[in-house]
Amino acid sequence: MDLVILIGSGAVGKMTVGQELMKITDFRLFHNHMMIEPVIEIFGKFDGAVVSKLRDDIFDAFIKSDNKGMIFTFMWAFDMQSDWDYIKHVSNKFEATGGTVYYVELVADRLVRLERNKTENRLRNKASKRNLAISEDRMLREETKYRLVSNEGEIPFEHYMKVDNTDLEPEVVAKMIQERFHLPDKGTTEMMNRVKLEEVRPDEIEQMYNMQIESFLPLYEKYHDEGSPAIEPIEKVRARAAQTTRKYYFIVKDGARVGAINIANKPELHDNTVFYISPLFILPRYRNQGIGYAAIQKAFAMHPESKKWRLDTILQEPANCHLYEKCGFARTGEEHIINDAMTLICYEKKIIVS
């Protein structure tokens, strides 16, 4: 399960950005004060040990759920080793599930944050901030006592971004985060439940072949690629399907066959952990619904032994490139010029084993 940690000083906008990020992804928000406020209400004062214990209980239960991921907000004192240790403690929980942790640091000018400290959304969700004189004084004292903004190059994590959101609306920042880390759109979890991969039987090859022609014909008419799947003979498809190292699957949504995917493994390369996707297609009338993304995720799940995935796509088709990058693929730099109008580029996704 994945985790997004939103980091920043008081009233920088962590919760509000988290709320917006939850609107456009399948991640759930667990903001800092969801545990702080009940503890203050029950105990009559802040108790850090109790807050930490309650948070851990939530984390442990959440990672066992069928949710896609969590958004967690935290005010990190970078000069306190205990905060570094706590972030590592929380991150380890999610990485142990095979998930990825994304770190987003927000920074904003003090005057802007003092204004944000008064917003209706903040005061509605954080009762302990409603006495503005006290909360403003606490915010200024925290800045004096702790270093709440990271130094340049201090954060060592691969999946990290720093955003100055002084003049940015929270929905803009949320979209920046989603696009930077290729977080799945809202509804992806639902689509994952509606999409299945069903192995293509030998007597179903012709049906799949006709679907392949329909799917690739517009690209052939656009690029006139002589290697296009739209014009390859059915004998070639049958031969590919007969290989013991390759399998075709129908992509099925709500019981309807909407496309197909071929998954290949090449043991002659002496590495059974490398898999290839070629081809993948969705019928035109079913596109732009998130089906391709769901099918690729299903392929990943079918081969937990995989360490690397590879595929090729057309450079001049940005929608295809976006899909694969959203799935975690990165360009290798290898390119093959097919003709004046078309170039194939190679993509690769490495699986990080915890």
Image (tube, rainbow, N blue to C red):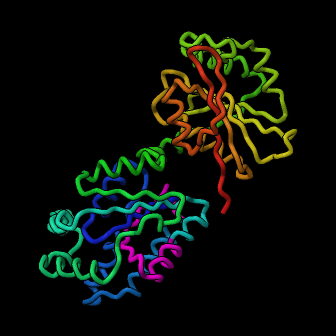
Magenta-highlighted residues: 64-90
Residue 95 lies in what quarter of the image? bottom right
Seen at 52% across and 25% down, the residue is 317
Residue toward you, 65 or 228:
228
Seen at 53% across and 44% down, the residue is 192
Residue 242, x across and y down, in percent:
83, 27
Q: In this view of the protein, can residue 288 be seen by the observer? A: yes
Residue 105, x across and y down, in percent:
38, 63
Q: Is residue 337 above or below residue 181?
A: above
Residue toward you, 205 or 127:
127
Residue toward you, 114 or 308:
114
Q: Is residue 84 magenta?
A: yes
Seen at 46% across and 33% down, the residue is 289
Q: How many marks?
A: 0
Tell me if 66 is positioned left or right of 45 in this view: right
Residue 111, x across and y down, in percent:
17, 66
Q: Is residue 352 magenta?
A: no
Question: Residue extending furthest front?
Answer: 152
Tell me if 301 is positioned left or right of 141 in this view: right
Tell me if 184 is positioned left or right of 335 in this view: left
Residue 126, x across and y down, in percent:
23, 72
Residue toward you, 42 or 232:
232
Q: Where is the C terminus found, in terms of image quarters? A: bottom right
Q: In this view of the protein, can residue 124 be seen by the observer? A: no
Q: Where is the N terminus found, in terms of image quarters? A: bottom right
